[in-house]
Image (cartoon, rainbow, N blue to C red):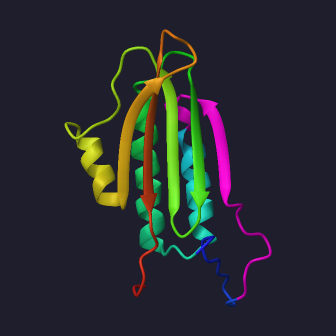
Amino acid sequence: MDQCVHHSANGARPASSPPPEIELRMPADRRLLFLARLVAESIAATTEFGLDDIDDLRLAVDEGVSALVVRADDDAILDCTFRCRDRLTVSLWTSSSAMPPPGPDEVGWHVLRALTDSLAAWTEPAQDARAWRICLEFTKEPRTGGP
């Protein structure tokens, strides 16, 4: 399947479907985490995700963004990419000079594992040689056969 299946109240495809990829760049600031949550929620609400899936996505985005914001350098940018195919893939990254990526020794990691279908975190060299790029990516597939 190339894209998420889109539904409307009357069963017709909505006139305005989300694009297959949406990018959001914002300061790595906890006060702005609602923006990433709104984007994920809006995409999921216009596709085949049910209410429980949308709640899971909202919580997963909260947890993922929070995990990176606390690791981010001052004045860092948080990049978020939302890709909608047969599942919603959320990719988050920011720069950090000292912190490792989120991992299984943290409660937040276990929350993300419970809410998502796949989860990965890693670091890679940033363009700024003094920092690292911390990356977190998870996917959520719509549940089938349920309400």
Q: Nearer the viewer, residue 38 or 97?
A: 97
As drawn, is 9 to the left or to the right of 86? right
- Where residue 53 sits, quadrant-wise, is bottom left
Q: Position of residue 100 (x, y in %)?
A: 33, 25
- The correct choice, above or below, for 34 with respect to 13 in the image is above
In the picture, which quadrant includes the N terminus? bottom right
Residue 27 colored in magenta in the image: yes
Q: Nearer the viewer, residue 97 or 10?
A: 97
Q: Nearer the viewer, residue 70 or 21?
A: 21
- Where residue 96 sits, quadrant-wise, is top left
- The correct choice, above or below, for 132 with respect to 40 in the image is above
Q: Position of residue 68 (x, y in %)?
A: 43, 32
Work out which residue is located at the far left of the displayed protein and give it: 105
- Highlighted magenta segment, given as a residue range: 12-32
- The correct choice, above or below, for 124 with respect to 32 in the image is above
Work out which residue is located at the far bottom of the displayed protein and give it: 10
Q: Nearer the viewer, residue 127 or 34?
A: 127
Q: Position of residue 63 (x, y in %)?
A: 39, 44
Residue located at (38% from left, 34% from top): 122
In the picture, which quadrant includes the C terminus? bottom left
Q: Position of residue 118 (x, y in %)?
A: 36, 56
Residue located at (52% from left, 15% from top): 74
